[in-house]
Amino acid sequence: MQEFLRAVDGLPLIAKVILCIPVLDIFYGICRVVKGITKGDVLWIVLGVLTVFPGAFFIWILDLIWVLLKGHGLLLGESYLG
């Protein structure tokens, strides 16, 4: 799973921005759940699940901002908001 997260992090910026489109943003939610599983942190998993289902309608805006400013989706950095 760690290789999957490295592959997502290695995508070009345009691909990351395309994945921020509202319907495709579920991909970043799945990445957040995978990150929680690899870290063994329940809070990461809960936040990931909340961004997949109920948060999928508004979280794409935050993901777009995070990708443009920091180069990765929300909650996909080393810290919770990093």
Image (tube, grey):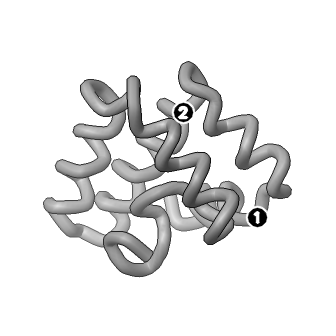
Which residue occupies the foreground of this view, 6 or 47? 47
Q: In the image, is residue 14 above or below residue 22?
A: below
Closer to viewer: mark 2 or mark 1: 2
Please tell me the numbered disc located at residue 72: none
Total numbered badges shown on the rendered structure: 2
Callout 2 amino acid? Asp
The residue under label 1 is which amino acid type? Gly
Q: Compute the Cα span from label 2 to label 1.
A: 17 Å
**28 with respect to 14 (left or right):** left
Q: Nearer the viewer, residue 69 or 26?
A: 69
Identify the image quadrant of the C terminus. Answer: bottom left
Residue, disc 1: 10
Secondary structure category for the residue under label 1: loop
Name the residue rendered at 24%, 51% in the picture. Answer: 47
Left of 32 or right of it: where is 21? right
Residue 12, image x and y in percent?
84, 56
Measuring from the top left, give residue 6's x and y in whole percent: 65, 66
- In this rendering, would 68 be left or right of 53? right
Q: Is residue 28 above or below residue 34?
A: above
Q: Is residue 23 above or below residue 51?
A: above
In the picture shown, does residue 81 fall above or below 16? below
Q: Secondary structure at mark 2?
A: loop
The reply to whether discs 2 and 1 touch (Cβ–Cβ < 8 Å) is no
Give the quarter of the image for residue 42. Answer: bottom left
Instruction: From the top left corner, tell me how far across and down residue 31 is, in percent.
Output: 48, 49
Relative to 51, 77 lies left or right: right
Residue at 26%, 39% in the rendered image: 49
Label 2: few (<14), some (14–19) or many (≥20) C-alpha neighbours in 10 Å: many
- The residue drawn where x is 31% and y is 47% is 48
- Residue at image mark 2: 25
Mark 2 vs 1, N-terminal side: 1
- Residue found at the very far top of the displayed protein: 23
